[in-house]
Image (tube, rainbow, N blue to C red):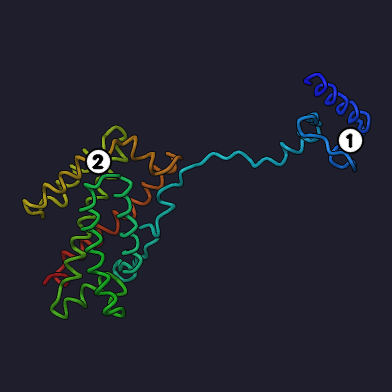
Amino acid sequence: MWLVFVLTGLTTWLALLTICDPSDGVPTSQISGIHASPDLQPHHLTVHSHDLHDYHNHQPPSTTATMPNFLDTIKRSFVDVTVNKDKENAINTSEFLEAAESLTTLFDVLGSVAFQPVKNDMLGNIKKIRDRQLAAPLESETLQELVVNELKTKKHVATEGLIWLVRGLDFTCIALSQNVQLSTEELSVSFRNAYGSTLKPHHSFLVKPIFSAAMSACPYRKDFYVKLGDDQEAVHQGLTVWLKALETQVAILKGFLDRPEAKW
């Protein structure tokens, strides 16, 4: 019985080869009246050189993912904050608050929950200033106008918020500036030194441990700067310009807040 089956299959195979010459390029499926078993159909794959050429030409280009520069992703840089030198270095309120908010995202890059209280503190002070701006927009176009006009109402919520925000920005600016300049110093050292000269003298014994924990939780500098972008030269140059603009604005505000018209 098995011999009959083999002979029958061989006969069918030879008939197919006779009817459809592979050289004529006509698929077996297009020959009317022939329904060969799939098990008996030959599986020949002919690949022509022009097919390979077309295949390679239509392949998507190979791309290597790159990390964008952190400063290119933020909403506003301090470089883009308007400082009117003709009006005693008046600083645009909306632009400054946007730049300060953008800076707080840097604490996310530091990658530790220990920095969350630092970030929340700065955002809380930004909110105090913005609330006053929204309540009296025509009297708050610049930070200096906002302070003077708020104090006329015998209130100082936004003014006090600005004082603490400037301290927080000063702390961040000094820490990063020192770390950028000293290429071998770890972030924890730079932030700890900056904390001692800016925020620490104004913090209570309850708050100091919280910020000290954040200083100890700083990542290694090699890990931190990689997160700021793949092009390290561009990262370094961008940080230098950004921090210089921040330093200038912090100095302007510290000088203004020490003046009699900013006291209550």
Q: Point out residue 2 in the picture as x, y percentages from the top left corner.
A: 77, 20
Tags 1 and 2 touching, CB below 8 Å: no
In the shown orientation, is residue 240 left or right of residue 205? Answer: right
In the shown orientation, is residue 24 left or right of residue 45? Answer: right
Identified at 29% across, 53% down, the residue is 247
**188 up-or-down from 139: above or below:** above
Identified at 87% across, 42% down, the residue is 30
N-terminal-most mark, 1 or 2: 1
**Whole-number angstrom distance, CA of label 1 to CA of label 2:** 69 Å
Which amino acid does the dot numbered 2 rest on?
A: Cys
Q: Point out residue 97 in the picture as x, y percentages from the top left corner.
A: 31, 64
Residue tagged 2: 218
Number of marks drawn: 2
- The residue at the far front in this view is 1
Dot 2: within a 10 Å radius of its alpha carbon, few (fewer than 14), some, or many (20 or more) residues? many
**Figure quadrant of the N terminus:** top right
Q: Point out residue 125 in the picture as x, y percentages from the top left corner.
A: 22, 63
Image quadrant where residue 88 sits: bottom left
In the shown orientation, is residue 81 left or right of residue 38? Answer: left
Which amino acid does the dot numbered 1 rest on?
A: Gly
**134 up-or-down from 170: above or below:** below
Residue tagged 1: 25
